[in-house]
Image (spheres, grey):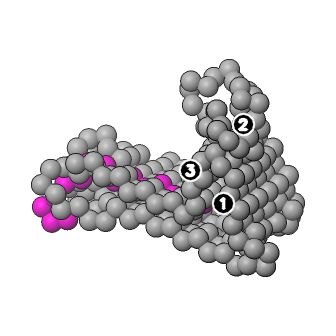
């Protein structure tokens, strides 16, 4: 049984959208919680949350915006099994559909932006090479011009748990504050301009195991600004992202979880994980 839980605060695709007003205090709260699974068949789940998701078009949100997005991976109920329990949360994710219809603008304009983006992996208790990983990104901008008066974001990801009869489970955590890219194939470049201060708090904590579960990947990866992976099929296409920031503060931390897959001594697993 495959269960997808997806929550989006503001979704825009190839249209021009204007919200808010000068002096307004806007609030966007999004939560995707995969909950507890009680099915007879093995369950598989993905929980995704996005505060603002834009795929082309011009979006303007006047006033200051508080944006909170959280994703919680699934947990098994009594007598039930889960083979996948991933969680992913994004504050702002901008991407470009190659052939826009109607609007030819690809921009997002904000006032002050504050908020917390968090993802918590769930619990996997069956299968091998499964995943209970977590990913939290503050701003992920692809091929869009994004401007803001100020940015104050917290991004935190915590890997899930390998339990029951699950083996070699991925319980890694990935957290990033701001990442960008752009493609010259479509004549676009990702650009972020923040006229006021930019403050980022980014933390990633790898997951672990419980009981007879087996965790293989419990690493933690945290970035403040930069580093976006490009898919293999785009090799040879130049990608770039332009940042215009001032007064930047970034506090970044990564803490590995606990591995025990393949350990010859289950009572002494590898703690600290990869960071």
Mark 3, Cα crowd under 10 Å, few <14 / some 14-19 / many 20+, is many
Assess whether residue 190 is covered by the magenta stretch: no
- Distance CA(mark 1)–CA(mark 3): 10 Å
Q: From this view, report whether residue 239 is shown above or below residue 93.
A: above
Residue 2: give x, y in percent of width and height.
Answer: 27, 48
Residue 231: give x, y in percent of width and height.
Answer: 57, 31
Quarter holding residue 216: top left
Q: Which mark is residue 56?
A: none
Residue 248: give x, y in percent of width and height.
Answer: 81, 62
Q: Is residue 78 visible?
A: yes
Residue 272: give x, y in percent of width and height.
Answer: 47, 55
Which secondary structure class fits the magenta region best? Answer: strand
Residue shown at the point (38%, 65%) measured from the top left:
33
Q: From this view, report whether residue 22 is shown above or below residue 242.
A: below
Count of numbered marks: 3
Task: From the image, state whether disc 3 or disc 2 is nearer to you.
Answer: 2
For this rendering, which residue is in front, 76 or 195?
195
Residue behind mark 2: 182
Q: From this view, report whether residue 144 is shown above or below residue 207.
A: above
Q: Which residues are magenta?
A: 77-91
Mark 1, Cα crowd under 10 Å, few <14 / some 14-19 / many 20+, is many
Residue behind mark 1: 252
Q: In the image, is 257 to the left or to the right of 123?
A: right
Q: Residue furthest top?
A: 236
Q: Is residue 179 visible?
A: no
Which numbered disc, 1 or 3, marks the residue that appears first in the sequence? Answer: 3
- Distance CA(mark 3)–CA(mark 2): 23 Å
- Mark 1, secondary structure of its residue: strand
Residue shown at the point (61%, 25%) measured from the top left:
234
Residue behind mark 3: 221
- Mark 2, secondary structure of its residue: loop
Mark 2, Cα crowd under 10 Å, few <14 / some 14-19 / many 20+, is many
């Amino acid at each position: 049984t495959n269960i997808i839980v997806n929550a989006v605060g503001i979704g825009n695709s190839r249209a021009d959208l204007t919200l808010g007003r000068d002096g307004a205090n806007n609030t966007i709260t999004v939560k995707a919680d995969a909950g507890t699974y009680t099915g007879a068949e093995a369950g598989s789940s993905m929980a995704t949350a996005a505060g603002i998701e834009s795929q082309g078009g011009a979006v303007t949100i006047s006033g200051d915006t508080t944006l909170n997005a959280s994703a919680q991976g699934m947990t098994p109920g009594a007598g039930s099994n889960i083979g996948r329990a991933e969680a992913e949360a994004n504050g702002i994710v901008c991407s470009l559909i190659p052939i826009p219809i109607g609007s030819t603008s690809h921009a997002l304009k904000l006032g002050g932006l504050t908020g917390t983006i968090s993802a918590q992996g769930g619990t996997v208790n069956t299968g091998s090479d499964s995943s209970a990983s977590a990913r939290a990104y503050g701003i992920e901008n692809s091929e869009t011009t994004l401007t803001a008066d100020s940015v104050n974001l917290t991004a935190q990801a915590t890997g899930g748990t390998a339990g029951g009869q699950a083996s070699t489970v991925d319980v890694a955590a990935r957290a990033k504050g701001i990442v960008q890219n752009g493609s010259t194939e479509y004549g676009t470049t990702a650009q972020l301009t923040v006229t006021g201060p930019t403050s980022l708090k980014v933390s990633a904590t790898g997951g672990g195991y419980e009981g007879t579960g087996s965790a293989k990947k419990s690493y933690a990866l945290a970035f403040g600004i930069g580093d976006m992976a490009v898919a293999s099929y785009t090799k040879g296409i130049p990608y770039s992202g332009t940042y215009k920031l001032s007064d930047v503060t970034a506090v970044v931390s990564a803490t590995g979880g606990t591995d025990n897959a393949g350990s010859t001594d289950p009572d002494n697993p590898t703690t600290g994980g990869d960071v």
